[in-house]
Image (tube, grey):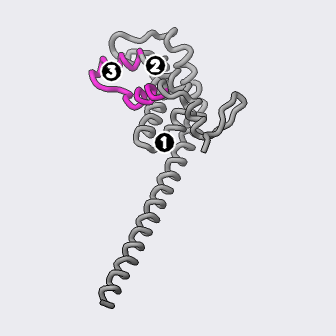
Amino acid sequence: MGAALYNVASLGVSFVALVLSAIAAWRQLRHARSQSALTTILEVYFRDIRDMDFQRDQTYVVTRLATEHPAPDEGGIAALPEQAQHAIWNVAFMYESIGMMHALDMMDSRVALGVFNFRIIQVWEAMEPYIMAERAMRQAPFLAFFENLYLQARATPPADLYRELGLRTIGGFTPRSG
């Protein structure tokens, strides 16, 4: 009887140790993913989004592209002049990257959709005719992560995300309750 009790106690201690090890490993993994995601977000935001060339190209895409170069019926983006091509590629791939990080859970949706919401919508809508022309030329998906990000941004008011985070603003967002 004493040996059986000793075996049960040993099994119980081993089980508790296993559970505690699993919890510690899970927390460590979560922390590592969080650190990696934060590094990625900061890199995108501080290095890429604030880059003067990116800002210039984004302004061009949103304010001048459609008036200076209507979307081509054939040839996709390659049918446009080099300056327009460069601006489209620079801006499109930035938002495609953000969309990819968001879809792969490398970027919290509260950041992707909260911080970039206005620009995601504005840029997609300015670029949509060019993206569709490129898709037609390729007869394949193109900038699918960006499109998914756009659709989620349209469906997610930033104010809801800010409330969820408990942000306060002069406009009246209040921290979440309870």
Which three-letter amino acid code belongs to the residue tagged 1? Met
Q: Is 147 covered by the magenta stretch?
A: yes
Residue under numbered circle 2: 127
Pointer 3 or 1: first along the chain = 1
Magenta stretch, overall SS: helix
What residue span does the magenta drawing correspond to?
129-153
71 left or right of 170 in image: left
Residue under numbered circle 3: 135
**Residues at marks 2 and 1, CA–CA distance in whole angstroms:** 23 Å
40 left or right of 169 in image: left
Callout 2–callout 1 Cβ contact below 8 Å: no
Name which quarter of the figure residue 85 lies in: top left
Mark 1 surroundings: few (<14), some (14-19) or many (≥20) residues within 10 A:
many
Q: Where residue 8 sits: x, y (%)?
A: 33, 81
39 vs 77: above or below = below
Figure disc tally:
3
Residue under numbered circle 1: 107
Which three-letter amino acid code belongs to the residue tagged 2? Met
* Residue drawn where x is 32% and y is 84% of the image: 7
